[in-house]
Amino acid sequence: MRWALVKVCVAVTTMVVVAFAVPLGLVIREMARDRAFSNAEREAAAIAPALSITTDRDELERVVASAGSDAGMAVHIPASDGDGSGSGGDDGGEGQQAVDIGRQRAADKDITTTRKLGRASTTEVPGGSTLLQPVALSSGEIAVVEVYVPESEVTNGVATAWAVLAGVGVALIVGSVAVADRLGVRMVQPAQRLVESAHELGEGKLGARVPEEGPTELRLAAVAFNSMADQVVQLLANERELAADLSHRLRTPLTVLRLNAASLGDGPAAEQTRAAVAQLEREVDTIIRTARDAKPQTAAVGAGVGCDAAEVVRERMEFWSALAEDEGRKVRVAGVDRPVRIPVARADLVAALDALLGNVFRHTAEGTAFAVDVHNGEDAVIVLVSDAGPGIADPRAAMARGRGSGADGSTGLGLDIVSRLAESTGGDVRIGRSVLGGTEVRIWIQLDGREPVRRGHRGAVRRRRPTKLVSTFNRPRSHP
């Protein structure tokens, strides 16, 4: 907007300057020409009284010399036939010869035409112009006074005047640019603050507000933005309260479930049930504490938040291996013999693994094998969860939040949890065919601290898939 205003002002000012400067420059040139020929007319008029008194050559030469114009003035007196009785004639009845004083520059025909018409005229000659002024003599003949006007005198002062006009025009354009720039700043700064506040609000800084200043339209936009931000904060607060209330209502059935699990006695199934109930109770407590927090938590990728992926995988596989053993499933774990640090909170990784492994037990038959592999690279960590089940017919529909297959009651929320975990690091999630014959879910966790990606329509990830470690996605692996 700022540069647009500057361009408009430059264009308008330039057109105004041209519209006024060009005609004014032409007027100045005409004025200089008129001044030069006016001076020539005065010089010619100074000779007229002497011509009316005498036509003696010597006298006329002295008059021309006294006028100081002998270099640029000429006098052309025609010959007479002697019939007149001029007072200045010394020849009596004899005719007088033609007299030409000074340097003649005009053509003879131009002089003859001026003498015949009896009025002044100008004609072009090499180096300038000449003024031909007719003067009546006492004998009745018409003499012609020729005054030379050089081109330098016709254009005297024109270049300086044009230079002044050009300077004034440039000054006007520069001044208009400065004024337009200041006006543009006054309009652009409120718009920039509005954009910055919108970005801050999008990043989770709910306290971002816009000063209500600037032009009327931008003030109204600031008022609307601040009102919207207040409503967003209120809606989030209501959602947190609702989540806390709903989670708190789960305490009663959880308490009953915990008491019933305690009465199951000893045995692997009883221990697993009690452990699951305890974990569910902890998760509900976490939801309540998070929802009651007045400030929403945002992801802190690369800011000291992280965990050991290998340790988490070992722990969760130890938990799920007991259930897999009861159902006769073969389990394989690889890549967890060394620590693998990732910029993901431990609770988030646990939730993602439990969601994927829970899907394996929920959507595949008993006895179906599954595996979890961890691949550690320079800039990324890949966690692969694969099974030997029937696979997923439509991976895109499975990745869309709230859009499961429908046949088995799946909502797709588990895969959405996994997707958000990967995307918070700048990575992504892919679903493909595993070497076991079923589904393989690849979680790409970025390590280089790039910004989290944004979702497109239907859960698609708007970023280019990383190039390193891609070969491990569908590469055959050996199994024990």
Image (tube, grey):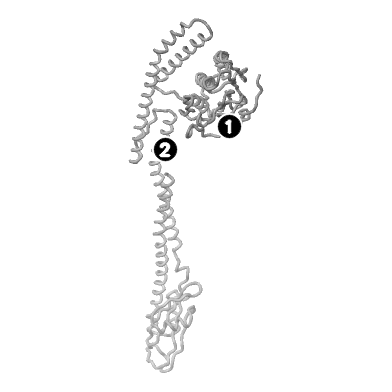
The spot of residue 223 in percent (x, y) is: 34, 35
Q: Residue at 41% x, 83% y: name it.
A: 115
The local secondary structure at tag 2 comes to: helix
**Between 269 and 200, the one nearer to me in the picture:** 269
Q: Residue at 43% x, 31% y: name it.
A: 202
Q: Does any portion of residue 304 appear in the rendered image?
A: no
Q: Which mark is residue 192?
A: 2
The spot of residue 384 in percent (x, y) is: 58, 24
Mark 2 or mark 1, which has the lower sequence index?
A: 2
Q: Residues within 10 Å of mark 2 (few under 14, many from 20)?
A: few
Closer mark to the observer between disc 2 and disc 1: 1
Q: Which mark is residue 218?
A: none
In screen coordinates, is 480 left or right of 27? Answer: right
**Between 462 and 125, the one nearer to me in the picture:** 462
In the picture of the structure, the residue carrying the numbered disc 1 is 466
Instruction: Say above or below: 384 vs 260.
Output: below
| Residue 207 figure quarter | top left
**Between 171 and 11, the one nearer to me in the picture:** 11
In screen coordinates, is 389 left or right of 3? Answer: right
Q: Residue at 40% x, 69% y: name it.
A: 35
How many callouts does the rendering have?
2
**Between 298 and 381, the one nearer to me in the picture:** 381
The local secondary structure at tag 1 comes to: loop
Type of amino acid at the residue the image marks with label 2 = Gln
User: What distance separates the C-alpha of mark 2 from that of mark 1?
Assistant: 33 Å
Q: Image quadrant for the C terminus?
A: top right
Type of amino acid at the residue the image marks with label 1 = Pro
Instruction: Say above or below: 249 vs 23.
Output: above
Instruction: Say above or below: 349 vs 136.
Output: above
Q: Image quadrant for the N terminus?
A: top left
